[in-house]
Amino acid sequence: MRTRKLSLSGILFFAAIVVYVGNVLGILFTEILTSVSKGWYNGPLPPKLTPEWYSYIAAEHDIANLLLVTFVVAITVVVLAILISFPAAYVLSRTEFRGKGLLLSLFLLPMIVPPMTYGLPLAMVLYKFHLAARITGVILANLVPIVPFVILILMPFIEQVGENLESAAKMLGARRFTIFRKVLVPLTVPGILTAGILSVVRTISMFELTFLVAGGRSQTIIVALYADAYAAGARPPQAVDALAVIYFCITMVCLIIALRFVSPTQMVFKIK
Amino acid sequence: MTRGLRGGSVLLLLPAILFVVLLFVYPFAYGLLLSFTTEHGGLTLKNYVAFFGDPWELRTIWVTLKLAVPATILNVGLAIPLAYYMRHGGRGEKVITFFLILPMTLGTVLVAEGMLNYMGAAGWLNQLLLALGVARQPVQFTHNSLGVLLSLIIQGLPFAFLMILGYVSGINPDLEKASQMLGASKWQTFLRIMFPLMAPGIAICFCLVFVMEFSVFPTAVLLGQPSGPTRVISLAAYQWAFEKFDFHISSAITMTMAVIELVVISVVLGGRNRLQRSASMVGGKG
């Protein structure tokens, strides 16, 4: 019997976690407090609270447009990614063929290679075809890491659906499209939801790719936030923090929804 | 299951293949071509000479390595004991994982912006350090390499932790029990049984974290000194493309970056195969 009382390893573990979580909370709370503070130059708490930075940043940025672009990009990317990935995931989980391993590694590469590395040549290609600096380009660029991600999430879900169900449908005269619509898709709804919500979270927080291809009217919140933080001094720092808090709230809502469907370990790359 | 690839299946795979070829393979090929040509066409090494021949540009490789290597070692080194401790789950697992994925989900830009306040001269962290008497005067955490390194740890540690945790919790717990029943101490169990089994996972984790850290961009700009001490390689590639509008030199830098990343991946994965062989030998004798 092991009663995990105060073992040394336990103390070290919780000390490490407390230091980490403490700093993360410190970062987030400073951010939130600064965005509603006035004249906070020293001391543990701001002397005066004010909502003015939020109206200031709303007037400076076209907030409605920023939000619209962010959501349109996220939703379009997810829908397109599922449409592209589902049939591919189906074939990859049901069929053995020559070059399958090679194809799988090709799909894996955009997930391993960091966005900054493939993002620059991708941006150049999108500029060459006049697709960049507009929302189409932002959507195309964001699809690159999301499609492989969705394929990898969907494959185990499709494998779980028994093949005899499909054979039964086929024997009853269903064509392939009908099998997809009536058998496979309804049975893999949990997988589609998992893939969808995780992709929304990823797309909203994807900075590098959006930054490289977006123009003024096609940038998402995170890119606007970077631009403001980069041009420190152009705007009051509290106003930049207000924008950061708006972004924070959106991501948090998506994350909390996501965690109702998936376990946190699904959010990182799985080692096979 | 084994049915071979028929016409219908090819059609179903086609959108995904087209997608990866057009938006991933083609841009890379295009970038490679740009890096070996000039505006007037014709194959040349000029762009690579411009990068490798200029100490100011070449330096970015060392600057980036000096950030990425310590960050990777620290992240993986800290993640191994933490994940090992959590391998059977335990109290507060959900809360802990929630706080770990939080900074990952929020993204580098938000964390960098928050760190500027929190770790600034008058921020909470310095107030705490001064109050505790750990520091005599405010420590400079931001606008230097330390700030970038700290942000790489805040972002990278959860990634390494969750990845190794996923791997450790997949190891058959009976092996550990057997080792303890045969009289091995906890430390021996870790060193002789669990660590060799974890090694392949750690190797993959190491190279993924390194590659991620090596491409650091927004934090190096926001938290570091992008004009010099933290002018990382991806910033150099970006500046050539979008500030000096020379896509050719920018592509040469990007391809150099890609080669370094691929070399690290293959070296670590090569070592991993050797480790895996010895691990399976251990398993075979048991």
Image (tube, coloured by chain):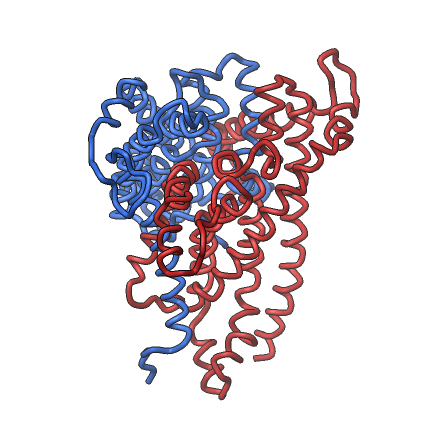
As drawn, B269 above or below A102: below
Residue drawn at x 42%, y 18% as measured from the top left: A136
As drawn, B84 above or below B143: below
Q: Quadrant of residue B45?
A: top right
Q: Nearer the viewer, residue B230 or A2?
A: B230
Residue drawn at x 49%, y 61% as measured from the top left: B78
Q: Nearer the viewer, residue B34 or A50?
A: A50
Residue drawn at x 31%, y 49% as measured from the top left: A262
- Give the residue furthest to the front: B136
Q: How many marks?
A: 0
Note whether residue B62 is visible. yes
Tell me the red chain. Answer: B
Q: Is residue A24 left or right of residue B6?
A: left
Instruction: Name the spot of residue A52 as percent of width and height, x first.
Output: 22, 26
Instruction: Name the spot of residue B121 as percent of width and height, x first.
Output: 42, 44
Instruction: Name the spot of residue A114 as percent of width and height, x first.
Output: 54, 38
- Give the residue furthest to the bottom: B183
Q: Nearer the viewer, residue A50 or A187?
A: A50
User: Image quadrant for the C terminus of chain B?
Assistant: bottom right
Instruction: Name the spot of residue B128 as percent of width and height, x first.
Output: 36, 55
As drawn, B28 above or below B112: above
Note whether residue A168 is visible. no
As drawn, B52 above or below B173: above
Q: Nearer the viewer, residue B132 or A215?
A: B132
Residue drawn at x 67%, y 30% as measured from the top left: B253
Q: Colour of chain A?
A: blue
